[in-house]
Amino acid sequence: MKAEFLIDDIIREGERSADEVEVFFTEGRSISAEIKQSIIGTAEESRGWRIAIRTIKDGRIGVSSTGDPGRWKECLAAALASGRIATPQDWHGLPKPTNMTSTAPSSDPDLIVEPERASAFIAGLLEGAAEYPVDVAGGGADLSRSYIAIANSNGVRYGMERTYAGVSLEAIREQSTGYEFMASPFAADIDPRWVGEQAAFLASHSVGGKDIATGHYDLILSPVAAAQLIGTVLVPALSGRNVQAGRSHLAGKIGEQCADEMLSIYDDPFTRGMGSTCWDAEGVPARRLDYISDGVLQCFAYDLKTAYRYGEESTASAVRSGGEGSPSIGVHNLVVDGPRTTVDDARAIFINSVVGAHTANPFSGDFSLEISNAYWVEDGEPGDPIRTAMFAGNVFEMLTGIAGLGNDSRIVGRLIIPSIRLNNQQIIGK
Amino acid sequence: MEPRYYDIRCVRGEITSVEIDNGVIESAGTSFFDKAVVRALGPAGWGILTLDHVDLGSRRARNDIIAAAMRLAGITEDRVDLAPAPHGVLASPPLREDPRNVDLEEKTRLLAEIESAARLPEVVNTRARYTEGIDQVRFLDSSGNEASYEIVRSGFSVLAVASRNGMMQMGSERDHISTGFNLRNKQELGRKAAETAVALLDAGLAKGGAVNAVLDPELAGVFTHEAVGHASEGDLIREGNSVLKGRIGETIGAPGLVIVDDPSLPEFGFDPVDAEGVAPGRTEIIRDGVLTAYLHSRETLASVGDGIAGHARAEHGAPPQVRMSNTFIENGDATRDEILAECRDGILLIGSRGGQVDPGRGVFQFNAEFGYLIENGETTRMVRDVSLSGEILKTLHDIALIGNDRKMHPGYCGKGGQTVPVSDGAPHLLLRNAMVGGRGS
């Protein structure tokens, strides 16, 4: 069944029982190939289809979703039933259609979703990995093209294509491992050879790591390590829902200096990233959102429900993972920015990634995490590897004392982030 | 070309969830899914096709999807073979109360009782979430094996955040089961989460470094899962990505240490038949400190050996991976008091905020929910934000005492982008020279 007709049927039928109806539709196809010890072990194709329905009646929001077009009536009934239980709230309506003039680079017309393309990426990964004496433990290539649409009973009908290309490789040498990856909506952004080579370098260079004494050291967090910490702690603290519910460290601090004055953090849905879009997951026109400008906290993120509840305005920050029924507050492309410099001239410990970032305390910002693929760096040159150590700190404090942002922005999930130099940080060694 | 083997696994079902945040019913509803995964073995490796809704009754539809999976298999190079394994389905544990017989209003009301029990003075935010999954699974393969079963999982989590003078701390509790409806008479867990959050406002920071550590059954269970369970998964062994590779028969842990994974136990990780149609059974990974077996799918058993198949699991609409189910350390004979006395000075680590392992490097990290300093064999001051990290091979030898009070805890485990229900457990353990992380000085 053509999705457009089905969406119209659902809205028409839903309007008989609810004040407003919204349908979020996703459909896609993806191809992935997985490496098993230097050759292609598995090839997979996924075809997905999902609708999520929201109904609103007297301020009560109901949700349901289904992957079976034949069950849409059951799904609509479940959404209405769910709405009868939800706590009613102040509600001023789903968005109305807007003429959007902006564009977002979310889809690559040249991206080919076929197994042969994945094979070519894998060949590149393996070629890169061969630069160092390592074994390849795993990895793979993923390609996908999907279509996302949102429609509501106020006449909103938006649709967009999304593409995805991603590669990763894990290398091992003796008891040292190295993992690297790259992902983008655009196939041309992907450099599988670099990914293979970098993973192999990390595994190979980490052999023979030395212990380090407990103490305070200057550190460089790679974009990946920085994204792991900021994604776990800062992103939830910027959510208006967490702020209003009393579980954000940043609540009540708008206008205050919450980060180093060299730091600006903003959501740019129109830049090239994994969350590029012209409208959010509720059909509100997307816009650039400056959370932190020159270290000063400017705003928080809101979706419609939270905004209406607390007398705020939606910041078009609704996101959905997959075809979930309810949207949640999130970021599209969170850019960490500021004046750039060379961060690895002066001696420091380079930390490629951290193990267990999700165990950081999202409320207080405190963390103590094992570091991975760490080594000394000086004059831009990698030096002696460090075998094992923990990095203990607090993300909010860390952001107030940045020693420098590197020249090397990259896409890590929904973040676009450079490496970050931090001086005088606590390391727990042997 | 004809496949050497194929299988099709369909999971159809419903997920019901209720979310309450600070007394507001944010959502309460049911969603539906119907997914199929088709795997075909070509001359070399797997071609895998995942789809929404497959009509298994139509021979033509079935042939088409197998042909599509075979085209994918055409680009693979790694020759996969499958070890023979016993097929069969265990009976699912009887449901004490079927959650489908409880209406959504009552589920919401019961969850609200748990959530409101967490509202103690200084608690600024309370959140509770109920999750219920009904899976109807159908499996068939080209060898004529068929299996079908239904499994019902029900449980909740509750989180309390306490705040004072800009300091914010949290406490959380959860309880999930596969034996029926699990929301009745659970208010005390809401209260317990709140008490932890409030108590943590007064807790100090732990000092990082090497200390004697006592792990409570929950954290010791997470340790078992993270540090040993993952490293014994046959796919990681085959890829050379585990420090346990090539160590069968080697003494890798303390005397008396027995570590088991058993999908057949009626705990939260119960699996009546694995995702390859294999009848699951108990695997002793470590017996008396000696590594004896790995966890396997049919494919990894054929290529690695040592162990039994039956440990392949899959999320809805995703291909099987070698996974744990119910993983635990068997009881020893020490009491908790004996363990604290033997520790003398150190730290007691309680609960888990999750963990992660790099099995190739043999390094693990996880966070306790909180801890107590141990002085002279007695617990004293409460400490917060304390983590434990270490090297798998060294840490297993550092287990100095094994308690006699094993408890299992339910949870969810992520691997390769898939999340499956598991349980893990252990008795209290004493670890010598554990690496404990904290910001205190």
Image: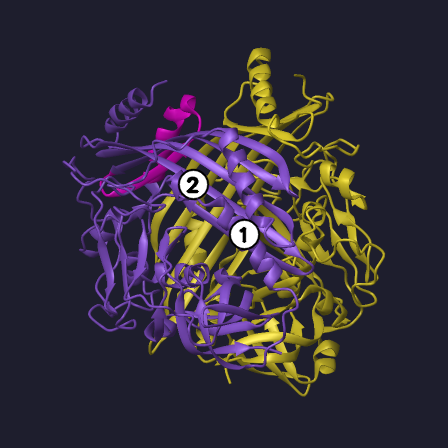
Quarter of image, res A224: bottom left
Placement of A342 over or under A162, stated as above or below: below
Q: Are marks 1 and 2 in contact (CB under 8 Å)?
A: no
Figure colour of chain B: yellow
Numbered disc 2: secondary structure: helix
Q: Nearer the viewer, residue A301 or A405?
A: A405
Query: Could you tell me which residue is drawn at 36 percent across and 54 percent down?
Result: A415
| Residue B225 in the image, given as x and y percentages of width and height | 65, 57
Query: Could you tell me which residue is drawn at 71 percent across and 69 percent down?
Result: B395
Q: Is residue B226 magenta?
A: no
- The subunit carrying tag 1 is A
Amino acid type assigned to the residue bearing label 2 in the image = Leu
| Residue B253 in the image, given as x and y percentages of width and height | 78, 65
Range covered by the magenta-colored residues: A57-83
Query: Could you tell me which residue is drawn at 52 percent across and 47 percent down?
Result: A168
Quarter of image, res A40: top right
- Return the residue at label 1: A197
